[in-house]
Image (cartoon, rainbow, N blue to C red):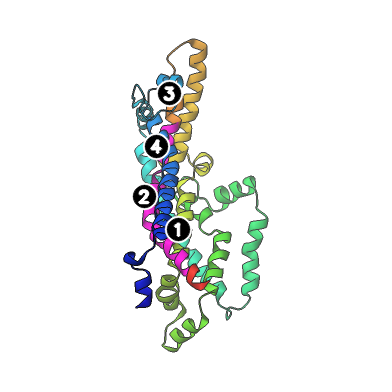
């Protein structure tokens, strides 16, 4: 009751109200500064190329244009690339989180024999990597993943760094909860999926976002292992478009022909590829806030 009276708006002093107004104004100003660059990029991508070069970045340009987006979506492979990228992002993130969670839980259990030796094998891959040529030979000749969607999924299935972080998060969960669940007859799979994972939503949300961004940005595999253009990812297609436009610009400078919108198309590609951040982060934001609250209570 006393706490409710202290938190009542009627009992706030003038200094508390002033401090609250200052906090709100500061947060609004900071949000505006964070939003302004995104807004400028969006408007610049919709600006005429010559106008952007002549006037620079403006909130209200003198001439609008959709040529940059027309140049991007004029390629017939863009819809297929979008579908491929969305598929590998969703499927890859799900499989990566599933395998990483099971592996992290196994290594967090002290009853697992040789768990330190097993963890060392994953730690070793952080320090040393095989290199591009051995990786190419392994994937192409032995695993035979060329021209298959598995080449986008299997190499990124488990991140050892994320696995160790998630293992440490699982280790902080009281062991008494696991022991009581085992006394009730629950096996390790049930303990993981019905007890550990629901208690680890902030950590799971963080690594889900990291995995999704990693899968969304894949492009080198398309260049190395794909012969079918319908299996290219969105990032590789957009990179190819920018590269071709840059070459066309150099030829136009020499021959005096029409210069394509190279500056605005770079900004348009940023808007096209920013999709996962815009659509994924709002769904995970509440878990980030929940993680901060949990950390504050533990502290």
**Which circle's residue, 3 or 4, is located before the other in the chain?**
4
Label 2 vs label 1, nearer the camera:
2
Residues at discs 4 and 1 in contact (Cβ within 8 Å) = no
Q: Report how many numbered discs are placed on residues in the image.
A: 4
**Which circle's residue, 4 or 1, is located before the other in the chain?**
4
Q: Is residue 195 above or below residue 99?
A: below
Q: Residue at x 64, y 72 (%)?
A: 116
Residue 133 located within the stretch drawn in magenta:
no
Q: Secondary structure at mark 4?
A: helix
Label 4 vs label 1, nearer the camera:
4
Q: Is residue 185 above or below residue 240?
A: below
Q: CA distance from mark 3 to mark 4?
A: 15 Å
Q: Residue at x 44, y 35 (%)?
A: 238
Q: Secondary structure at mark 2?
A: helix
**Which circle's residue, 3 or 1, is located before the other in the chain?**
3
Q: Which residue is mark 1?
A: 208
Q: Which residue is mark 3?
A: 52
Which residues lie in the magenta part? Answer: 267-294
Q: Position of residue 209 (x, y in %)?
A: 45, 55
Q: Secondary structure at mark 1?
A: helix
Q: Which residue is mark 4?
A: 39
| Residue 285 appears anywhere in the view | yes
């Amino acid at each position: 009751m006393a706490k409710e009276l202290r938190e009542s708006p009627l009992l706030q002093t003038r200094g508390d109200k002033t401090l609250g107004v200052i906090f709100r104004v500061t947060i609004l100003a900071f949000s505006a500064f964070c939003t302004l660059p995104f807004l400028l990029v969006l408007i610049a991508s919709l600006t005429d190329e010559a106008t952007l070069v002549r006037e620079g970045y403006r909130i209200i340009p003198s001439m609008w244009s959709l040529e940059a987006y027309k140049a991007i979506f004029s390629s017939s492979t863009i819809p297929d690339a979008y579908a491929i990228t969305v598929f590998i992002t969703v499927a890859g993130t799900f499989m990566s989180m599933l395998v990483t969670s099971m592996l992290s839980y196994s290594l967090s259990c002290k009853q697992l024999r040789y768990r330190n030796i097993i963890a060392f094998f994953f730690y070793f891959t952080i320090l040393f990597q095989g290199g591009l040529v051995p990786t190419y030979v392994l994937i192409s000749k032995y695993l035979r993943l060329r021209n298959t969607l598995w080449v986008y999924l299997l190499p990124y299935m488990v991140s050892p760094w994320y696995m160790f972080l998630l293992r440490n998060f699982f280790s902080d969960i009281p062991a008494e909860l696991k022991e009581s669940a085992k006394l009730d007859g629950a096996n390790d799979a049930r303990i993981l999926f019905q007890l550990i994972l629901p208690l680890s939503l902030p950590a799971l949300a963080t690594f889900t976002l990291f995995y999704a961004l990693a899968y969304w940005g894949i492009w080198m595999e398309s260049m190395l292992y794909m012969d079918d253009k319908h299996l290219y990812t969105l990032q590789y297609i957009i990179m190819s478009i920018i590269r071709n436009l840059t070459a066309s610009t150099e030829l136009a400078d020499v021959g005096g022909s029409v210069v394509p919108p190279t500056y605005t198309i770079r900004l348009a590609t940023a808007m096209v590829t920013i999709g996962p951040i815009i659509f994924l982060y709002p769904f995970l934001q509440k878990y980030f806030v929940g993680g901060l609250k949990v950390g504050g209570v533990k502290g």
